[in-house]
Image (cartoon, grey):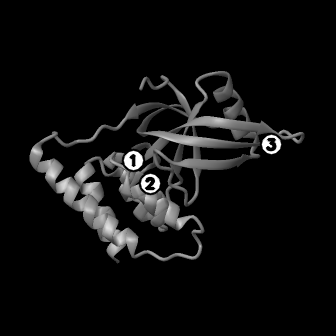
Amino acid sequence: MNLPEQVGVMVLPQTVFFPHHLLPLHIFEPRYRVMVQAALEGSRMFAVAMEPSKTDPLPQSLRMGSLGLIRSCVLQPDGTSNLVLQGIARVRLDHLVQTHPYLIATPEPVEDSEEKSDAATVIQEALHSKILEKVEKIDDPALPSLQEVKNFLQHLQDHHAFVDLLSGCFIRDPLQRQKLLEEVSLTERLRLLLHLLSQ
């Protein structure tokens, strides 16, 4: 996929957005109204990154976010809007080209750091199976469509989509979610997800 050279960046507290996920947003801040309008007139894309805590040792420039595509947007009479953003890629946002009134960055796609090999595939398949076993034991009344999610995951062959969807659905802690987002090795993401689901 060809990414735009520059994208707006929405920085949200306690929010980690994954590829393959849908994120509903209510846009009300003036700066983000401008950003969304610019996105709609251009690539229809912007990035979402978690706002670092005051104790976070990593500066914002080293953080990773996800690039999203605006799938639908409804403008309200008061100038706010409701939209649905579809996550399409992990991106580094190291290079900021604007900081006011909102951030604009040059998104750099993050590729899997592993070489494809038979050995890596065997490990990933084993981790995939163990994760599915854990998911089958989850019983969460707060997720009314949990069985539908489980059925869908049983047939999902794309390990990248698998780990992103599970991370977004079942991992609640924002810092743990950010670790999953920032891990560039698919095998290590699967390991970390299994560890978190086992806790």
Q: Secondary structure at mark 3?
A: loop
Q: Nearer the viewer, mark 3 or mark 1?
A: 1
Q: Residue at (50%, 66%) from the top-left corner?
A: 147
Amino acid at circle 3: Thr
Kind of residue at badge 1: Ala
Q: Position of residue 41 (x, y in %)?
A: 68, 22
Task: Write the residue at 57% across / 47% down.
Answer: 22
Sequence-wise first label, 3 or 2: 3
Marks 3 & 1, CB-CB < 8 Å contact? no
Question: Disc 1 designates what residue?
Answer: 161
Q: Which of the numbered marks, if any, corresponds to residue 80?
A: 3
- How far is the residue under mark 3 from the one under mark 1? 31 Å
Q: Position of residue 170 (x, y in %)?
A: 46, 66
How many numbered badges does the structure rendering display? 3
- Is disc 1 in contact with disc 2, using a CB cutoff of under 8 Å? yes
Horizontal side, residue 34 vs residue 180: left or right: right
Q: Earlier in the sequence, mark 3 or mark 1?
A: 3
For label 2, count other residues whose C-alpha is less than 10 Å away and answer few (under 14), some (14-19) or many (20+). Answer: some
Which three-letter amino acid code belongs to the residue tagged 2?
A: Leu
Q: In terms of image quadrants, where is residue 2?
A: top left
Residue 58 is at least partly visible in this image: no
